[in-house]
Amino acid sequence: MPISLFVKNRSDGLTFYINGDLQFDTTDEAIYHEMLVIPTVALAVERFPDTELRAIIFGGGDGLALKQVLRFPQVSEITLVDQSLEVIQLARTVFQPFNHSSMESDRLTVYVEEALNFISTLADCSYHIVICDFTYPRTASDTSIHSLEWYQQVQRILAPKGILSVNAVSPELTPQGFWCLYQTLLKAGLSAKPLQAIIPSFVEHIHGIWGFFLASAVAISSSEVQAMSMPENLQFLTPSRLYQAFVFEQKIAATRHQLTINTLDCPQLFYYLLNSDACETVHNSEETINFLDIQEASTGQIGLVNPFSIVAISQQWLAQMPQSLQIIQGNSPTNVDISRLLPVQHLSHTSQMSLEWLNFTQKLVGTIDISRLAQAVEKRTQKLPPDLRTNVQSFAVTAQKTKSLPMNLLGFEPIFVVIFVIILIANLSSRDSGFGKGNTDNHINNITDNINSINNNFTRQQIESNSGLNIIGCLGSILMASGGIWLLKLLFDYFFG
């Protein structure tokens, strides 16, 4: 997809953005790039003494990670693979004073290519060092270079005892996303060590404390990290700062177990990044974990269904149907995860929007006259299959006890769930629902009229039309109705199949 590049020049340096996301600020880029590169290469030098090392950088077209690799004379060959020719051109011109002309090194070979395609062409055990300097994922497809399949390929091209470093996400703001990467690395057979650093420009842009991973097929020990030698004249990294980077608060690290890993078929990482405000943490603990002191095996689960598919979302609704009804009725059972019922699925969507939609749904259900609905259902008992009649009659008897019977006392009656979904579909398909198709020119009072019509007739024969309905609105209605039919079939199969 096309990318948007923006360079903001200042008297003391510049800031670089891709698609609106901060890539680096020259005032503190050294914190990021030294943390990403120096431990990785220094550890490789320690593990492969008297060896001419081969390194590959995926991403990093700005030449700043490359600048750090070039500090090590032991690295004789460097391959840089970036999909953006424009970024590489900036590295050779605008960024040249800041990357110290790293792109002109005679140790460097540059390829303008997509990383997944390129790595599949490489021979086994062809590099001692792999550095993944990718941008923040902004689509589900962007997470393919953070997938199990990707890290399996990385492990394949790494020499025995070779070292991998990964630019991750924020363990502070998106802990489930961060630990999803951790579990994915472990599942790929790599021993992964998480690190974190405070980068002022990242914090200023509300990216939070930033995370990295240091990984290898051979376990990384505390003793070898302490023994490795760093180059002189680093701007930020010191041995004490490096050791402290492996220490995480328990309230953040506690989310690392029992997560779904990220695969090409199941982009779980993107799901966690979008739904980060649903993360559970231990709020009353001041304990810390030093990941240099522990070795962990993967506890991550392999997802069977794309979390953004209608199938996955419907399964969550069906699994939590009784509790879901309580939420819609105004209650809040603690064992219901609203984020799974109404997950964020796009960058322009937020959890607050989901809550607003849920509030709208609650008001809609509140206009239903349960007693009249029960009578309408009972009148049509003979038209239903025999195996549904008992359920319908039970619902009608319960609902007719009193007109003011609270909805949460109706019990978990499957037929009511189906009717409830019909009502919602009918109103979302109607033009009076701005949320459904983007139109806001009709009054919400029409909702009550629609529900009264359903109470009187039970089966809505015709949705109110409007000659001014545009083509997009019609298409929205068709898609909503088609989805509704599919959902109703799921419900009937679930309850009565």
Image (spheres, rainbow, N blue to C red):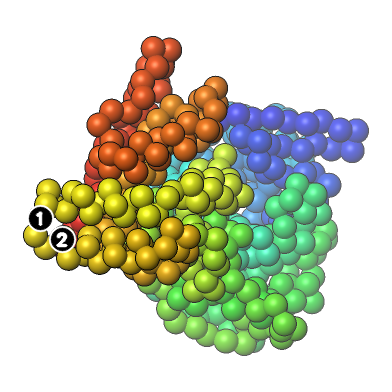
Q: Which quarter shows the C terminus?
A: bottom left
Nearer the observer, disc 1 or disc 2?
2
Using a 10 Å C-alpha cutoff, classify the residue at mark 1 as few (fewer than 14 neighbours), some (14 to 19) or many (20 or more): few
Question: Residue 428 versus residue 272: which sits nearer the camera?
Answer: 428
Tell me if 410 is positioned left or right of 174 in this view: left
Outermost residue, right side: 11
Q: What residue type is labelled 1?
A: Pro
Q: Is residue 119 visible?
A: no
Residue named by callout 1: 385
Q: Which of 160 and 201 is in front in this view?
A: 201
Residue 371 picture location, percent across and down: 37, 55
Which circle marks residue 389 in the picture? 2
Crowd rating for badge 2 (residues with CA inside 10 Å; few <14, some 14–19, many 20+): some
Residue at left offset 71%, top offset 84%? 285
**Which residue is at 62% across, 82% downward?**
292
Which percent across, then down, holds residue 112? 48, 35
Q: Residue at x 90, y 33 (%)?
A: 11
Determine whether 420 is above or below 242 in the image: above
Tell me, yes or no, whether the two marked residues, 1 and 2, touch with CB atoms within 8 Å: yes
Name the residue furthest left. Answer: 386
Q: Is residue 419 in sight in this rendering?
A: yes
Name the residue nearer the viewer: 8 or 435: 435
Q: Is mark 2 on a helix, strand or loop?
A: helix
Query: On screen, 441 above or below 222?
Result: above
| Of 139 and 103, the residue lying toward us | 139
